[in-house]
């Protein structure tokens, strides 16, 4: 951490917006003034952009921190805000989703059509007994049914828990169990990298009796046919979407729910082995989702075509595929597959085909395109692009410049957006048309958001210095807790700066001389691989669950394309070595982790070693292992119980 902070960034280029862009932009410097003059009044104004069945009179209740309530005497329906109200305003014929399947099939779905579909799904779910507060797990590919399912659950005042389709049966099971889901919505399979990747078998496995006498909470599985692959069927439990949804009624009146009614749970990795169910509620979340989507992306719903490449399994997909764009009545592209299937120019082809004007993706994707070269995007007409966004990890200035030149035609502003699953929506970003952008800096808190960089004691570090990123005031889309574990919520985010009442984000950051923020990566045991959060502890516990492994230590090592890569050091049991050949074991362990957690968690390298570096109190010194993994000279080893251990490990790794 300190080595990262000491590393001074010498990037000084600045790109002010063109006069033309600034003149037409939605955001203006006045937004900052309004927000700082009256923060709560400002958020109330933003909230009033939504439709409230019952208007709120209270803005923020912070009487029992860290548990916030926003707009809590108001009532609304989240799905109504994303659908019906656009139809009622005469925009039913506007396209909501320009969906493109990986094999090239396409569907254009208008707001009127999506509204009808969501009403039908809501009726089906209601028929299955789903009501206010019930949990529905969604395990789907990037198909329109995924968005429709989320909104149908929201329409009923129920709670969705979307599980990324790349997660394993085990990961799915633990999420279903933790949330106590009543229904699972899945598909037979979806297209990835040119072939059908099955999903239903993982659901079957996750719901299989595990002989521990524990009661299964799932009563029904609703299955979309997408991959046309063969599936097993449990009569009475499983239902085909196409058997029940098209025939359901499309009459469904949206009920009003309190602003603090839970909307969704989304699991994310923390510093311990067990993923945390981050809980978001309705009114505040939707307010900030819509506000940020409008202002950060300068959205003109009549003319723009928005495309956020995130999967709905992640928070970015929740806020900037489903809720933000639809609350704002945007037209957006949704793409099922991988960026390189069937050819490496697939994304650029989609931008050209649909005339995408606002494009939001992750630095890891940009870096992998840089690797394959600019000739590929240059074969396509990308002139429709007028604004670019980046999210998920720090974007290095080289990638930023490439993004600007090759994808943005040297004119489109880039907004580098910092936020988290926990923050629900964007917190730090340039405002297009207002901010002069700097390659590599996420820049400034949005109007209405209060952020600071402090030292370990919670004291502001001031411009020119590095420290820890904190959020100093509650914000509307903040997490309301960790599902079923209020203590963990307090400990994880609020204990460190309890005295000051700051939210601790877990990120290191630096303020430059102008007061702009530069994010420096996580300061805890959370890794960021291709913009996805992974916990070292979670992967370690998966490794030691393998019969061969006695001990394991996992570190995030810097990687040119993925930002960080998972590198594991494992000690093999003597008893195992006595009976098995060690050859091929590293490869076996890699795929083991992939099966246990999901392909994104599969270590890049597994090193079999005889020892792990530990302090006298038995704590593993990951810092030293990171040195080895990154091929550096090993740092200070004087606090190790056995100082010779690192040279043994280094030689074993070579
Ligand atoms: C990192 C994704 C630098 C950060 C929306 C944060 C970033 C974690 C940026 C949250 C950015 C996200 N610059 N770092 N623009 N955006 N991060 O929950 O470490 O998947 O804490 O949310 O990603 O990841 P999460």
Image (tube, rainbow, N blue to C red):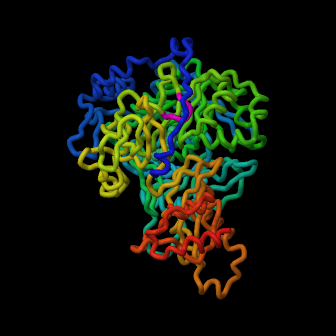
The quarter of the picture where residue 155 lies is: top left
In screen coordinates, is 35 left or right of 571?
left
Q: In x, y percent, where is residue 380? A: 76, 28
- By secondary structure, the bulk of the magenta-drawn segment is best described as loop
Q: Which segment did they paint magenta?
A: 438-442
- Pick whichever, 615 or 114, lies toward us: 615
Q: Quadrant of residue 486?
A: bottom left
Q: Is residue 78 left or right of residue 61?
A: right
Is residue 126 visible to us here?
no
Q: Magenta stretch containing residue 230, yes or no?
A: no
The residue shown at (59%, 35%) is 397
Check if residue 441 falls in the magenta segment: yes
Tell me the quarter of the picture where residue 570 sits. bottom right
- Relative image position of residue 330 (x, y in whole percent): 54, 26
Q: Nearer the viewer, residue 156 or 339?
A: 339
Q: Is residue 86 in view from this perspective?
A: yes
Relative image position of residue 82 (x, y in whole percent):
47, 31
As rendered, which of 467 and 110 lies closer to the eye?
467
Which of the pair 418/14 is nearer the observer?
14
Q: State the quadrant of the C terminus.
A: bottom right
Residue reaching furthest to the left: 63
The residue at the point 72 percent across, 27 percent down is 353
Callout count: 0
Percent of width and height locating residue 582: 69, 78
Residue name at image x 52 percent, y 13 percent = 24
- Left or right, residue 243 beside residue 383: left
């Amino acid at each position: 951490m300190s080595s990262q902070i000491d590393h001074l960034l010498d990037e000084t280029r600045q790109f002010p917006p063109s006069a033309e862009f600034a003149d037409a932009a939605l955001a203006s410097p006045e937004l900052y003034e309004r927000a700082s003059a009256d923060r709560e009044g400002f958020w109330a104004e933003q909230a009033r952009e939504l439709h409230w069945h019952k208007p709120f009179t209270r803005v923020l209740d912070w009487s029992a921190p860290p548990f916030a309530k926003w707009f809590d005497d108001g009532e609304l329906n989240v799905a109504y805000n994303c659908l019906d109200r656009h139809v009622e305003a005469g925009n039913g014929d506007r396209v909501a989703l320009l969906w493109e399947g990986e094999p090239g099939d396409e569907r254009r779905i208008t707001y009127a059509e999506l509204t009808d579909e969501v009403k039908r799904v809501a009726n089906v779910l209601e028929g299955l007994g789903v009501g206010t507060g019930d949990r529905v797990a969604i395990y789907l590919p990037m198909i329109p049914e995924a968005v429709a399912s989320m909104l149908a659950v929201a329409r009923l005042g129920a709670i969705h828990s979307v599980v990324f389709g790349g997660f394993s049966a085990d990961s799915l099971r633990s999420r279903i169990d933790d949330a106590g889901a009543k229904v699972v919505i899945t598909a037979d399979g979806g297209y990835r990298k040119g072939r059908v990747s099955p999903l239903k078998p993982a659901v079957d496995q996750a719901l299989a009796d595990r002989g521990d006498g524990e009661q299964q909470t799932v009563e029904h599985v609703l299955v979309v046919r997408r991959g046309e692959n063969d599936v097993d069927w449990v009569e009475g439990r499983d239902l085909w979407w196409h058997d029940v949804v098209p025939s359901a009624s499309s009459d469904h009146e949206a009920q009003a729910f309190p602003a603090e009614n839970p909307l969704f749970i989304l699991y994310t990795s923390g510093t311990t082995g067990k993923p945390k169910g981050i809980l978001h509620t309705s009114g505040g979340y939707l307010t900030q989702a819509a506000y940020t989507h409008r202002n950060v992306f300068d959205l003109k719903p009549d003319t723009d075509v928005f495309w956020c490449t995130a999967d709905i399994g992640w928070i970015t997909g929740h806020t900037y595929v489903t809720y933000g764009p639809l609350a704002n009545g945007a037209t957006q592209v949704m793409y099922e597959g991988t960026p390189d299937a069937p050819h490496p120019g697939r994304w650029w082809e989609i931008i050209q085909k649909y005339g995408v004007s606002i494009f939001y993706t992750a630095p890891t994707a940009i870096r992998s395109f840089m690797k394959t070269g600019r000739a590929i995007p240059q074969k396509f007409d990308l002139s429709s692009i007028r604004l670019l966004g980046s999210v998920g990890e720090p974007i290095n200035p080289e990638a930023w410049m490439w993004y600007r030149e090759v994808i943005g035609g040297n004119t489109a502003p880039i907004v580098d957006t910092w936020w988290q699953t926990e923050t629900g929506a964007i917190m730090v970003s340039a405002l297009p048309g207002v901010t002069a952008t700097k390659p590599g800096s996420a820049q400034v808190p949005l109007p209405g958001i209060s952020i600071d960089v402090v030292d370990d004691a919670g004291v502001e570090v001031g411009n020119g210095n590095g420290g820890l990123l904190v959020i100093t005031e509650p914000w509307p889309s903040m997490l309301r807790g960790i599902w079923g574990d209020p203590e963990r919520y307090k400990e994880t985010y609020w204990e460190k700066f309890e005295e000051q009442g700051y939210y601790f984000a877990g990120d290191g950051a630096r303020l430059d001389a102008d007061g702009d923020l530069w994010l420096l990566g996580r300061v805890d045991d959370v890794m960021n691989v291709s913009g996805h959060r992974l916990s070292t502890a979670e992967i370690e516990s998966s490794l030691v669950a393998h019969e061969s492994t006695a001990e394991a230590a996992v570190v995030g090592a810097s990687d040119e394309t993925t930002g960080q890569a998972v590198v594991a050091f494992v000690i093999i049991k003597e008893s195992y070595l006595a009976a098995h050949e060690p050859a091929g074991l590293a490869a076996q362990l890699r795929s083991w982790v992939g099966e246990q957690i999901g392909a994104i968690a599969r270590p890049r390298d597994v090193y079999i070693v005889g020892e792990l570096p530990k302090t006298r109190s038995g704590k593993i010194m990951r810092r030293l292992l990171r040195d080895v993994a990154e091929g550096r000279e090993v740092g200070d080893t004087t606090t190790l119980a056995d100082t010779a251990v690192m040279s043994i490990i280094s030689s074993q790794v070579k």
